[in-house]
Structures are given as C-alpha cells and as structure tokens.
Image (spheres, grey):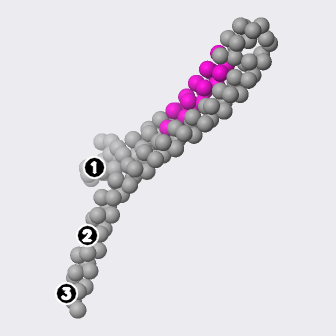
Amino acid sequence: MVGEHSKGVKEPHQGKGFGKELSKLNLISGLGFTIIANILVGFVLGAFLDNLFSTTRVFKVIFIVLGTLSGVYNGIKYLVKELERYDKIDNVDSGNDRVTDLKNHEHKHREDEKDE
C-alpha cells in the first residue's frame, strides 16, 4: 500500500524523491569522508616524521594543517563536480518538458493562425 492513494492509484514520483534524498546524503558523506581522510593522512605522516626526526609535534601540526587545507580543497572540487553532474541530469530531465512545451506552443500558434 506504500505510494497509493485511498482509491488504489499509485503515485508516480514517490520513488524519485527518495532517490534524490539518498543522493544528497551520499554527496554530504562523500564530502565528509574526503576531508577526514586528508586530515588522517596528514596526522599519520606528521607522526611518522616526528618519530623519525625525534621532534615534538612539529610535523604533526604542520601536516594536520596541510591535510585540512587539502581536504577542504578536494572536498570543494568533489562538490563542484557532483553538482555539475546533477545539473546535467536536471537539464536532461527538464529538456523533455521543454520539448513538450515547445510542441504545445507551436500547436497553439498554428490554431491561432487558422482562426485569423
């Protein structure tokens, strides 16, 4: 009975909304994973260099900052790429509606010419 009105008619776009919500969640989790992964790599690399050169947290701090900057940069790049992909998908979907609207407009224009 999911996606049906009380008269038993199925709603046509219920599944699409759920898919869009999941894709948004995927986008946000991908951004978070990208930033956190870069920070962790910076931390591990900094800890390794601190142990190698017997320094106290100098390389950890430097590489955590570099990892954070790299993570934010890569995260923004990821977002821009995904948003461009979503725009292409939306343009294709709305392009079908535009073709239908254009055909309806041409048909209406022809009927107006016949009336004159």
| Element type where label 2 sits in the image | helix
Q: Earlier in the sequence, mark 2 or mark 3?
A: 2
Amino acid type, callout 1: Lys
Q: Residue 2, percent across and down?
A: 33, 42
Q: Secondary structure at mark 3?
A: helix
Quarter in which the C terminus is drawn: bottom left
Confirm or deny contact between disc 2 and disc 1 (CB under 8 A). Answer: no
What residue is at 77 percent from the left and 7 percent from the top?
A: 54
Q: Tell me where residue 53 sits by quadrant.
A: top right
Asked whether residue 41 is drawn in magenta, I would say yes
Q: Tell me the residue that label 1 is attached to.
A: 10
Specify the label residue 60 is tagged with. Answer: none
| Residue located at (34% from left, 54% from top) | 93
CA distance for labels 2 and 3: 17 Å
Identify the magenta region.
27-44
Marks 3 and 2: in contact by CB < 8 Å? no
Q: CA distance from mark 2 to mark 1?
A: 28 Å
Looking at the rendered structure, which numbered label has been put on residue 114?
Answer: 3
